[in-house]
Image (tube, coloured by chain):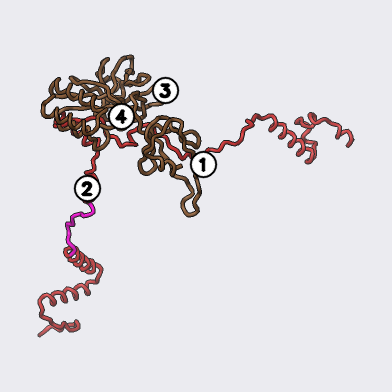
Chain colours: A brown, B red
C-alpha cells in the first residue's frame, strides 16, 4: 500500500477511491517483515485493511509515512487540538456554549481558563470572542473547548478582542496563512502594524491602529483567497503606496 | 447383594450419605458425568475466535501535524509586544538548528598543557601520600637536589658519634 500511496502523491483523488493493504504487499526476504505504520490525515479514512478517500482533492505526502488530502472547503469540522475563534452564545451554570461555525455548538467549562477556580470565575460575557482549542472533537459527541494547554497555562488563549474585526475566510486560506514561511503573511507583515488571530475554523480577527487600516487588511485577506501570487503582490504593493 | 447395588439409581448414588460406600471407579464415573452436564449447560457464543490484529493505519483528523501549521496569533511591527513574545515561544523557528550546532564546538576552559601540568602535580602529591616517611624524605631530598643542581651524594645513614 505504501508504494501505491507514494506513487499517487500529487494526483487528484475522489471520494470512494481506495487503497488496500493486501494486493501489492510482497514480503521481502532481506528487509524487515513487519509492515510500517501509515498515518492517514484528514480526507482519508481507515476501513479494515483498506484506506478510503472521503474528500476530493490532491493527495499529499510527508516523510516518513504521512498522507492526507489537500482539499478546499468552507465548512469547518472540529478536530482535536485545533485552535479556533469562537463566539460565546449562552452562559448557563458552569459551562458556556460557544459557536465556532460547525454543525453544533461547543461547550466550554468555566474552569478551563487560566487561573480560574470554583470561587474565581473568569469574566466571560455572551458575545465575547474566545481563542481556544478542542479537547474533545468526536463526530458523535458534543465538542468541548478549553482555553488552557496541558500545563494549565493560557499561552494566548482565552477571551480576546476589543476593537477588532472578525470575518470569515475559506479553510484553505487559513492553512495557507499558518504554514511555515507563509507568503501571504510575509506580504501582510510589510503593510501596517497590526494584530492578527487566525482560527482553524476559518475565522480571522484583525486589529490595527485605525478602523480604516483594519478594514483595508480585512478586505485584502478576504480577496486574496482566489488570487495568484503575482496578483496578490501587486495589490499589496498598491496598498502600501497608499493608492487604496 | 451385589446385583442390588447395580440397580441403585444414579441420583441416589450422588447423594452425600451414599458417597462413603462407593468404590473408586463409580466415584470417578459420577464425577465425569457431572462435569459434562455442567459444561453442557454453560452458555457460550458460537463465534470464530476474535483475534486483535495490529493496526498499521493510524488516523489523524487534524491538518496541524500534517502541514506543520503554526500557532494562530500574530502581531506585526510591534503592534502588540506581548503577542510577539508569544509568537517566538509558540513557533520555534529554524534558529534552533543553529543553536544545536554550537555545543559541539564547546569552548575549552582548560588547555591540554595546563591539564597535563595539573595532573603531573596531582600524581606527585598522591604518590607522596602513599609512601613511607623515609621514602618521602629521600624523594624530597632528590627533588631539592634536582632543583638546585648541586648533587651531593648522601652516604648510607650511620650513627654519628658525638664529638668530644
For disc 4, the neighbor class at 10 Å (few under 14, some 14 to 19, many from 20) is: some
Q: CA distance from mark 1 to mark 2?
A: 44 Å
For the point 46% across and 40% down, which residue is it? B56
For disc 1, the neighbor class at 10 Å (few under 14, some 14 to 19, many from 20) is: few
Front residue of this view, candidates A124 and A49: A49
Our reading of the magenta stretch's main secondary structure is loop
Which badge, 1 or 3, comes first in the chain's sequence? 1
Q: Nearer the viewer, mark 4 or mark 2?
A: 4
Q: CA distance from mark 1 to mark 4?
A: 34 Å
Q: Are marks 1 and 2 on the same chain?
A: no
For the point 23% across and 40% down, which residue is it? B93
Where residue A141 is drawn, which disc sits there? 3
Q: Is residue B103 visible?
A: yes
Regarding mark 1 in the picture, which secondary structure is present there? loop
Report the span colored magenta: B103-112
Q: Position of residue A212 (x, y in %)?
A: 14, 20
Query: Which residue position holds label 4?
Result: A172
Amino acid at each position: 500500500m505504501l508504494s501505491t500511496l507514494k506513487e499517487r502523491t500529487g494526483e487528484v483523488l475522489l471520494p470512494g477511491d481506495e487503497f488496500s493493504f493486501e494486493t501489492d504487499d510482497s514480503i521481502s526476504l532481506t528487509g524487515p517483515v513487519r509492515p510500517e505504520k501509515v498515518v492517514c490525515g484528514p480526507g482519508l479514512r481507515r476501513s479494515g485493511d483498506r484506506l478510503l478517500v472521503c474528500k476530493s482533492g490532491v493527495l499529499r505526502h510527508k516523510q516518513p509515512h504521512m498522507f492526507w488530502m489537500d482539499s478546499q472547503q468552507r465548512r469547518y469540522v472540529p478536530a482535536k487540538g485545533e485552535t479556533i475563534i469562537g463566539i460565546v452564545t449562552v452562559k448557563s451554570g458552569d459551562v458556556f456554549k460557544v459557536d465556532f461555525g460547525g454543525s453544533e455548538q461547543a461547550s466550554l467549562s468555566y474552569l478551563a481558563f487560566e487561573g480560574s477556580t470554583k470561587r474565581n470565575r473568569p469574566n466571560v460575557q455572551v458575545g465575547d470572542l474566545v481563542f481556544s482549542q478542542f479537547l474533545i472533537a468526536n463526530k458523535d459527541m458534543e465538542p468541548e473547548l478549553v482555553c488552557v494547554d496541558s500545563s494549565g497555562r493560557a499561552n494566548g488563549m482565552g477571551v480576546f478582542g476589543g476593537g477588532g474585526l472578525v470575518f470569515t475566510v475559506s479553510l484553505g486560506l487559513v492553512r495557507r496563512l499558518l504554514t511555515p514561511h507563509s507568503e501571504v503573511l510575509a506580504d501582510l507583515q510589510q503593510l501596517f502594524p497590526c494584530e492578527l488571530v487566525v482560527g482553524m475554523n476559518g475565522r480571522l480577527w484583525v486589529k490595527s491602529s485605525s478602523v480604516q487600516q483594519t478594514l483595508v487588511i480585512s478586505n485584502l485577506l478576504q480577496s486574496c483567497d482566489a488570487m495568484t501570487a503575482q496578483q496578490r503582490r501587486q495589490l499589496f504593493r498598491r496598498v502600501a503606496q497608499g493608492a487604496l | 447383594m451385589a446385583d442390588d447395588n447395580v440397580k441403585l439409581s444414579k441420583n441416589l448414588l450422588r447423594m452425600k450419605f451414599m458417597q462413603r460406600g462407593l468404590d473408586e471407579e463409580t466415584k470417578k464415573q459420577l464425577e465425569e458425568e457431572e462435569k459434562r452436564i455442567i459444561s453442557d449447560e454453560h452458555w457460550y457464543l458460537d463465534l470464530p475466535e476474535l483475534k486483535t490484529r495490529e493496526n498499521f493505519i493510524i488516523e489523524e483528523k487534524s491538518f496541524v501535524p500534517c502541514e506543520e501549521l503554526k500557532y494562530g496569533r500574530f502581531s506585526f511591527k510591534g503592534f502588540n509586544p506581548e503577542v510577539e513574545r508569544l509568537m517566538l515561544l509558540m513557533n520555534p523557528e529554524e534558529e534552533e538548528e543553529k543553536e544545536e550546532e554550537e555545543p559541539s564546538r564547546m569552548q575549552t576552559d582548560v588547555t591540554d598543557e595546563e591539564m597535563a601540568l595539573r595532573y603531573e602535580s596531582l600524581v606527585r602529591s598522591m604518590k607522596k601520600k602513599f609512601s613511607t616517611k623515609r621514602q618521602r624524605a629521600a624523594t624530597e631530598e632528590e627533588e631539592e637536589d634536582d632543583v638546585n643542581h648541586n648533587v651531593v651524594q648522601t652516604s648510607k645513614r650511620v650513627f654519628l658519634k658525638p664529638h668530644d
